[in-house]
Amino acid sequence: MEAALTAILAPFSYSFMLRALIVSVMVGVMCPILGAYVVTRSLGFMGDALAHAVLPGMVIAFMLGVSPFFGAVPTGIAVAILVGYLSRKAGLSEDTTIGILFAGLFALGLALMTVARGLPVDIEDVLLGQVLAVSNADVAATLALAATVIVVLYAFHKELVFNSFDPTGAKVIGLPTRALDYLLLVLLALVIIIALQAVGIVLVIAMLITPSATAFLLVRRFTSAMALGAVIGAGSAVVGLYISFYLNLPSGPAMTLVATAVFVVVAALRRRVA
Amino acid sequence: MVNGAPQAALIVENVSVRLGGEVVLSDVTFEVQRSTLLGVVGPNGGGKSTLFNAVAGILPLQTGRVLIYGVPPDKSKGRIAYVPQREEVNWRFPLTAVDVVLLGRSRKVGWLRRAGKKDTAIVESSLKRVGMWDERSSLINELSGGQRQRVFVARALAQEADILLLDEAFSGVDVASQEGLVTVLRGLRDDGKTILMATHDLTNMAERFDEVLAINHHVCAFGSPETAFTPEVLEELYGAHGVVFGNGGGHHA
C-alpha cells in the first residue's frame, strides 16, 4: 500500500511532472468534450487533418525561437477556416479537399523541420507527443486556450447542438449556420493544439474520438457523453502519463493505449450485458 | 390587403429559382390564407423542397418575392418553422424528444442565454399537444417515423411559429401514423396555424388537405383538392414522361 502510494506520488517531486500532469488532465478533459461533436458529426478525418496541417506553423515558431503556440494557433485557425471554405465549394468532395490540404501542409512542415538546423525539439516529440517536456509557458497557454474553448462552447451550446443535429432547421430559424460550422472547426483546432503536446500529431485523433466513443457506449445523451468522455479522457491521460514516466515511453502512445484499452473493455462488457 | 381584406398568411409572387444553372421554379404564384392546411404535391425533383426553402428565405430568388403576413421571410425569421426531410437530419446526434423541442426555443431564448421555466413549460405543452409527452425522454432516433414527425411539429409549436413547412412528412411513416399526424395538424390549423406539407403521395388528398398546390417546376394546379386534380394536371405531374422530363431535371416519381 505504502509502496503504491509512493509510486503514485514520487514522480511529483520533479516539477516537470507536475506540469505534465496539468497538461495531461487538460488534454484528457478537452479532447472528449470536442470529441462528442467529432464522433456525432463524423469529423474524425477533419480532426486528424487539422493536427497534421498545423505542423508548418509550429516549425516556423520554433525557428523564430518563440512558443510553438504562436505558430500553431494562427495556423490552426487559418486551416480550419480554409477547410470549411473549400469543403463548401463544389467540385471536389470534402475528404479529397481535406486530404490534399493536410498532406501538403504536413509535408511542408516536415521539410521545414529537416531544413532548419538546431531546432529545440525532436521530430519524434512533435509526432508522438512528449508531455514530460512542457514548460511553464506551455502550461499557461494550455490553461488559457482550454478556458477559452470551454467558455465559447458553453456560450454557444444550444446553437452548436441545433446546427449539428438539423442544419436546415437551424438555418430556417435564423441561426448563422455557416459561422457556427467555422466556430466549431476553430474550437476543434484549438483543442488539437493543446493535445499535440501530450499525444503528438499522429495520435491526436485517438484522444479526440476514443474516450468520447467509449462514453457514447455508456450514456445516451449528448451532454452526458461530453461529461463522461472528459472523465474517461482525463483518466486515460493520467494513467498514460505514469506509464510514460516509468516505462520511458513517448506520452502519445501510452495515453492512446490506455484509452483504447478502456474502450475495448467497455465495448466487451456492454456486449455481454446486452 | 386590399380594402381591409384579411392579410394573407403567405404570398408567393412570380418566384423563379435557378440552382446550378437549372430552372427549378419558374414564375410560381399563389396565396395562402391563415388557418389553411395546404398539400404541396408533385414528382420528386419537381421543386417542392426548393419552394419550401424559398418560402423559408434560405435561398436566393431570381425573380419575384415571398411575403409572410406582408413581411419578407428574411425579416420574419422565427415565424416560419421547418420540419425537415428525413435525409436532412443527423440522426446519430443523440437528443431526446425534450431536447429537440427545446431547440425550437433557441431564438426566443436568444444568444448567450439559457432556457428558463417558461421555456420548459412551453416544451411540455408542445409535446402534450402532439401526444408525445410520454415519450419525452426517448432518444429521437429510437422513435418511429410518425413519432419523429410529431416531435418536430412540437418543436415548431415551441418556436411559436405561424407557418409550418413539412417536407415529405409522410415518407417512412405508416398509414395509421400518417392519419394521426394529419389529425394533429388539423387541430393546429384550427388554432390559426398555416401549414404547408409537401408529399408525393396522392392518396386521400381531399380528406387530408384544405387546398392543394400541384407543382412541377411551375404551378400545374392550385385550389381545392376536388377541383385541382383534373386528368390533364395528373398527366402533367406524373403521367407522360415527356412532360415530366421535358421541363429540365425532373425525376420520375
Image: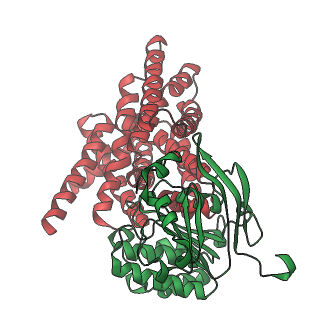
Chain colours: A red, B green
The one of A78 and B84 positioned closer to us in this rendering:
B84
Residue appearing at x 64%, y 84% in the figure = B192
The picture places residue A193, in percent across and down from the top left corner, at: 48, 39
**Residue A80 to residue B17: above or below:** above
The picture places residue B189, in percent across and down from the top left corner, at: 58, 84
**Residue B243 to residue B235: above or below:** above
Where is residue B109, by image quadrant?
bottom right
The picture places residue B87, in percent across and down from the top left corner, at: 42, 58
In the image, taking residue A20 as reference, residue A147 lies left or right, namely: right
The picture places residue B41, in percent across and down from the top left corner, at: 50, 66
The one of A258 and B122 positioned closer to us in this rendering:
B122
> Where the C terminus of chain A falls, by quadrant?
bottom left
Q: Name, please, the residue furthest toward the right.
A: B3
In the image, taking residue B10 as reference, residue A188 lies left or right, namely: left
> Where the N terminus of chain A falls, by quadrant?
bottom left
Residue appearing at x 45%, y 29% in the figure = A102
The one of B249 and B187 positioned closer to us in this rendering:
B249
Report whether residue B89 is seen. Answer: no
In the image, taking residue A179 as reference, residue B133 lies left or right, namely: left
The tally of labels here is 0
Residue appearing at x 55%, y 61% in the figure = B215
Residue appearing at x 16%, y 63% in the figure = A271
Where is residue A159, by image quadrant?
bottom right
Q: Name, please, the residue furthest toward the front.
A: B231
**Residue A7 to residue B43: above or below:** above
In the image, taking residue A114 as reference, residue A154 lies left or right, namely: right
Report whether residue A233 is seen. Answer: yes
